[in-house]
Image: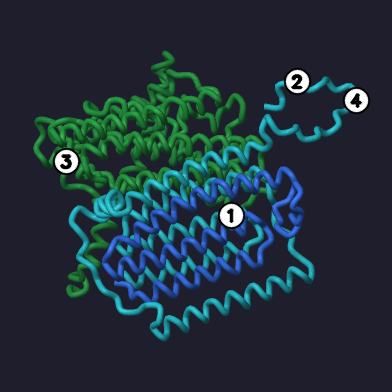
Amino acid sequence: MIPLPWLLLLSAVVFAIGVVGVLVRRNALVIFMSIELMLNAANLAFVAFASAMESLDGQIIVFFVMTVAAAEVAVGLAIIVNLFRLRETVFVDEINLLKG
Amino acid sequence: MPALLNNPDLQFVLWALLKIVVILFGLLGVVSYLTFAERKIAGHIQARTGPNRVGPLGLIQPIADVLKLFFKEEFIPAGANKVIFHIAPMLAVIPALVTFSVIPIGPAFTVTDLNVGLLLFLAMSSIGVYAITLAGWSSNNKYALLGGLRSSAQMISYELAMGLSTVGVLIIAGSLSLVDIVHAQRNLWFVVQQPLAFVIFMITAFAETNRAPFDLPEAEAELVAGFHTEYSSMKWGLFFLGEYANMITISSIAVVLFLGGWNGPWLPDSLKFLWYFAKLGALIFFFMWVRWTFPRLRYDQLMQLGWKVLLPLALLNVVATGTAMWWVLNR
Amino acid sequence: MIPVLFVALAAILVVSSLLVILHRNPVTSALFLVLAFCSLAGIYLLLRAEFIGMVQVIVYAGAIMVLFLFVIMYLNLGHDVEGGVAIAVRRGVGWVLGAVLVVEGALLLGRGWATGPVTPGGATPPGGNTQAIGLLLYSRYLFPFEITSMVLLVAMVGAIVIARGRGPSAPAPPAPAPPAGAPAPAPEERA
């Protein structure tokens, strides 16, 4: 068995990497990938707890998180493509007007 | 030393490695002779003889081909992304070989019996998209890029129908383990209970392996050679190897899911694997027969077929199978 | 053997996720993210969550990341050019905040706050992980499952509507002035 604290530490590290990615990058696509990293860090924590408690509920939550992540990516990428069509850029600090 | 050899972990690893080596070399040898078979079959379908000059009946032809490939010049186009350009051909071969680890060849010969074996196959076939997409993108060539984009759209579309067509089998067998699925077909092959799913699976299998009539990613009439336009030497050879390895893998999955795997009359248990190889050979011949018989689809026809015909039919099949099983179980 | 595999996979996971946010080329970032997801799937397998591990590869590596790659290639993005004082400051702040987050998490773990007493439930039922998940999904979690399917449906419609751009009912965007002598655009172009 893998000790639970190791898994939680790994999850925390990956989550922090995702946070840093959102904060330091300007490319909307990379920011989006960092968000996916954070979601996966949370998933890892869920699976870790599920395995430690020998219950499957954590894995089911992960299943739902994945579905929602897929939906989110589809809509988010559509928005990014549309933004690129309008503004010719994917850098979030150049997209600073509400008017399209 | 004996103490070390008695370590169960080590024994497990050594035993697995031995099986992997047998499968790997067997597969690679078969692949090189499949190219020969393909050329012979193409020749006979077109009323030619096919290769017959190198060795008796042309049997040494594949070895000569491979030697030629090894000695050709490696060429990397200017402006290509070098690392990805090198990784893409490897990605074409690896998923097919990984999938082979869960295929039950005979009652006593399976590399591993995963209880999610079928999901592993679906996962690996979705990884296979990367090889062609990345090859197309990293070559810095418009034809290659177009071929790569076409293939990623095509493979994603057909993966859905393929996954759904296997669901009917899963409902009847009640397991994701390929060994259990083969055992469930001891009396009746699933192709009898699931004819529609079998047809859908075979059509999507052609699309997943990028073979005619779905070889749009490398349509030579429009795209030069598609995603592998810029590849030469053994890197091109790896794409070729990947295509044939994929063909073997996907035919094996079709045999296991629909044609009863190693099940068959007459032979004793220790020779049942011959049935598996016979069915596999027949399916591969079918692949080649189709390739040299049907013309290529147009791109919009391909998408229409995938989304408007195969996907609804596969869904219908799932619903019908579910209803039938519910009726059978509640009777 | 399992701890060794875990450490190896964890190292791959951390390094590749760092490279996701550090590499300037979005395609390379996406590929390292695929690697991260695959190593995460390996960790799930080590935790005896086979179903989730395989679904991780199918959904994340096979569907979501292909979509990312497709968009990156479609938009034809090159390397990101990043410079200037404001960005440097922001980058510094970002890394400091990330470090604070990691230290905080480590401290919490060190004091044993986050882990608490673990109460093992029953042993895993027979029939394997997939069957157990299926039974649970269609009994206790049936309602969330149906809601999720609605989420997917809405997202699908939304993605198509957004990515299609302006619909036929909206006023057509101002077309770029055609070069002199060009034929008038065909009326069905607005579709």
Q: Which of B276 and A3 is in front in this view?
A: A3
Would residue B150 be seen by someone viewing this image from the given angle? yes
Q: Are marks 3 and 2 in contact (CB under 8 Å)?
A: no
| Badge nearest the viewer, 1 or 2 | 2
* Residue B83 disc label: 1
Q: Which amino acid does label 1 sit on?
A: Val
Q: Chain B is drawn in which colour?
A: green
| Spatial CA span between label 4 and label 2 | 16 Å
Q: Colour of chain A?
A: blue
Give the residue pinned by disc 2: C186
Give the residue pinned by disc 3: B183
Residue reaching furthest bottom? C111
| Spatial CA span between label 1 and label 4 | 46 Å
For the colour cyan, the matching chain is C
Check the image and report above or below for B244 versus C187.
below
Q: Which amino acid does label 4 sit on?
A: Ala
Check the image and report above or below for B79 versus B62.
below
